[in-house]
Image (cartoon, helix red, strand yellow):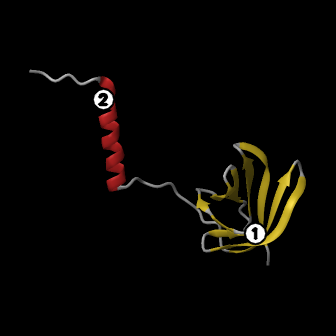
Amino acid sequence: MSITIRPAVFRTAVLATAVSAVAVLGAPGIASADVKSGNYTSTTWSSGAVLLQRPGRVEGGDLVLIGRYPIHRTARGGYVDFFPGHRVFMNSDGHGGYSGPAYLGGAVVGRFTLTPRR
């Protein structure tokens, strides 16, 4: 008696095995960079105009502005989700600050910057 295995079932089993092995053994992570702790001026720009500017700080892996928002690390800095659908990226500018696109619902709606305050 022979067993017939459908190709889709076989692929699913192989994929499940690979995912399980990565979960158990670990996968090599991408290099990540921290957004450095300190005091900053946070600025949100749209069409070249400042929409909102306020003092803030990065503390313990969080961006502290009106509330406390966890910073998710990326290879160039990080990103913050202020609320569902509103994400800003903070990519190192090489001079102690950070800037990146601001998204709302998946569309770029402006730019976000963190400028160090001394």
Where 22 sits versus 32, above or below?
above
Q: Quadrant of the C terminus?
A: bottom right
Q: Amino acid at mark 1?
A: Ile
Mark 2: secondary structure:
helix
Q: CA distance from mark 2 to mark 1?
A: 50 Å
Image position, residue 82 (x, y; %): 70, 59
Instruction: Name the one closer to the observer, 44 or 97.
Output: 44
Which label sits on residue 9? 2
Q: Looking at the image, which residue sits at the far bottom? A: 118
Instruction: Name the one closer to the observer, 71 or 115.
Output: 71
Q: Looking at the image, which residue sits at the far left? A: 1
Earlier residue among tags 2 and 1: 2
Where 99 sits versus 106, above or below?
below
Instruction: Name the one closer to the observer, 13 or 37.
Output: 13
Image position, residue 110 (x, y; %): 80, 49
Rendered residue at 34%/33% (across/down): 12
In the displayed structure image, the side of residue 114 where residue 63 appears, left or right: left
In the displayed structure image, the side of residue 92 where residue 112 appears, left or right: right
Figure quadrant of residue 4:
top left
Rendered residue at 28%/23% (across/down): 6
- Local crowd size for mark 1, using a 10 Å CA cut-off: few (<14), some (14–19), many (≥20): few
Is there a contact, CB below 8 Å, between mark 2 and mark 1? no
Q: Looking at the image, which residue sits at the far right? A: 49
- Local crowd size for mark 2, using a 10 Å CA cut-off: few (<14), some (14–19), many (≥20): few
Q: Amino acid at mark 2?
A: Val
Mark 1: secondary structure:
loop
Q: Which residue is mark 1?
A: 66
Image position, residue 49 (x, y; %): 91, 54
Rendered residue at 32%/55% (across/down): 25
Which label sits on residue 81? none
Image position, residue 73 (x, y; %): 58, 60
Rendered residue at 84%/55% (across/down): 45
